[in-house]
Amino acid sequence: MRKIDLNKSKGRHQSVSRQFTWVVLVVFGLLVSFGGYAKKEIMTLEQTVTAHYVGSSVVSPDGQLTAYTLVKPRTPYEDEDGSHYVELHLVDNQGNSRPFITGKVSVSSLQWSPDGQSIFYLAKRNDDEYTSIYRIPVDGGESVQVISHKNNISSFSLNSEGDKLVFVAKPEKDKSEKKLEKKGFKAEVYEEDIQFNHAYQVNLNNLEESPVVIDIDAHVLSAQFHPGKDHLLLRTTPTPHIDDNYTTSEYGIYRLDGERVQAFKTEGKLGEAEWSPDGKYVAMIGAEDKHDPASGRLFVAHSSNGKMTEYVKDYAGHVKAIEWLSDSQLAYIGHIGTSSEVSVIDLKSDKVESRLPLGEAVLRDFDVSVGGKNMIATLSRADHPREVYSMNKDQLKRLTQSNPWLENIAMPKQESIKYTARDGLELEGILIYPIDYKKNQRYPLIMMVHGGPEAHISNEWLDRYSYPIKYAAGHGFAVFLPNYRGSTGRGVEFSKKGQADYAGGEFNDLVDAITHLADEGVVDKARVGITGGSYGGYASAWAATALSEHFAASVMFVGISNQLSKFGTTDIPKEMYNVHARKYPWDNWMWMLERSPIYHTDKAQTPLLIMHGKNDTRVHPAQSMELYRYIKTRTDTPVRLVYYPGEGHGNRKAPAQLDYAQRLMRWMDFYLKGDNKGQQIPPYELNHQAQLEKDGKEQDAEE
């Protein structure tokens, strides 16, 4: 506050008056600071879809600087349509951040050079036709293209000497393909014309030499140089199909000539893997068995003989990320319930030490400098998206501030709660209260159901286009995000509880959550809406049909309506068998049909909004068409189907995200708050044109 010099006043009366004014201003300032009279802004849907967040962060070898990517969604109505922009920024350990590569760019796969003088990254810049590898010096200077390829490079790895590089990409595209396409020859042979990824070796001391293909008879997913030898840790699959990635991928050690010198026998899903600093071990995140829904077990393998050890058996959560602190100390991030923790395994003593319980901060990824001196992480809290933090001496220190405007946003109360299902199983979820919540007043509820179901909701920043939580809380809704049975974060046994029981106990858990919240006096059971995507979309479809009496509104996104046709049109049939149904449709046709929302459309009384990306390969868009047609034909229940051209299993572009969020919230307002003015269904159109013209006039006025 500006200091007032009372000594320069012209008289006693004026001085007293100014003193009084000063006191009032101070009191008002304190009231504002503590929320007494402050009326912070309600988060808008535009702010929800355009909030910035840190994508990844990597610390320099000496631990003094951290390079990170800042994700900036495009601004609807202003920018041309397209994917989010991703910038490169640097921050030091005091929190001084500076932009390095900004604007209309998309940077990924950051890696420091061994000497810490440069940062390598992937991007498509200037006139690039394909994604290439670039390098930018840290002490100033322009980016230089290191490697380009006649196809997109997906990942790369530098060796410890900084003179070799291996990148992963598909082979050069056939030049005749484009010519044939122009002549009308565009036939696609399903699943047979997919190209394999190859690993290519590059001599950084002589970039005039062409990259050399490493002779490996498999589809390469990732490559990582040994810390001291010319060996590679590769993750491969027998084919490029996404189902093989989920069910049959494996890690192995290869020479640069393609000879495999060590295989690691695992079963089921795999996550990341990391060499120990001396190369003696390989740590990897894997699965308990092929029926484990998610990779969340931690294994350490001897690189010499392939022998594997699980150091954290029967872990009550799921391991999400790993980093070596030394040759014999391995740190890991564990997600337990709705929170996370950092722990360290000492391979010499076999002891596990919990280093940093994070409470209401949720860690997603971390990185460690050479020698383990500095640990950097990306984490989020309920009041901000992912940011860069340092984690040293068991303390967290925030280093970046990507959304200063959040200081003016009203933050609703958000907490992790537990409740008991009808069969006695203890469950968890995140409850967000309305901004102006008053005890003993009942509110309309929007239940937001996660997909997977091998996923879970943590107590962190949860807002995105399909979960506009702070907007909903600011407009009088309570929001609940359940971790129903089959979710991760509670160990393998809990994550298997929904298997072979499609839409059984897992979706009954949602109804039991409503009962609990109503018994607590928070929710009006007559005004409950549900929404979710993928498996959450399946839940929303089931809620609108088989469980229709419990829900007053439903919004289904990229969801499942027919388990029979879902199996025949998805790109993950083996995964569906292994970790979901545990049977094939022909094993019990009727059971599959009865666990399909279309079978129960005669019960559909819940107004249902269905939305789907037209290019979805995971859940075919026809799943939405089937449910729409059945309800439209069999009932008079309001139903609407919206397709998003160019979008897949989820909307990636800001305009489609905003359109989705607007339709979602209008549907909930209409049916849960009575904002229908006697109409049966909201108008189908949204007035994007008016906003476009408004923004255009404002831009013209500024110019």
Image (cartoon, rainbow, N blue to C red):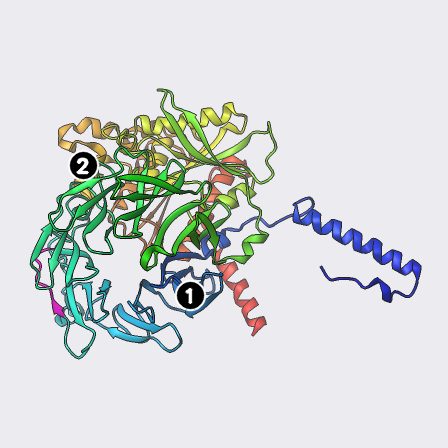
Instruction: Indicate the secondary structure of the residue bearing disc 1.
Output: strand
Please give the name of the residue rendered at 21% of the width and 26% of the height, measured from the top-left corner: 591
- Which part of the image, by quadrant, shows the N terminus? bottom right
Q: Is residue 423 above or below residue 409?
A: above
Residue occupied by mark 2 = 289
| Residue 462 image position (x, y, % from top left) | 44, 45
Please give the name of the residue rendered at 24% of the width and 30% of the height, measured from the top-left corner: 499
- Compute the Cα span from label 2 to label 1: 41 Å
Q: Residue furthest top?
A: 423
Residue occupied by mark 1 = 90
Indicate yes or no whether the magenta region holds residue 216.
yes
Residue type, label 2: Asp
Q: Nearer the viewer, residue 375 or 36?
A: 375
The quadrant in which residue 348 appears is top left
Answer left or right for 225 relative to 58: left
Q: Is residue 105 above or below residue 317?
A: below
| Residue 103 image position (x, y, % from top left) | 42, 69
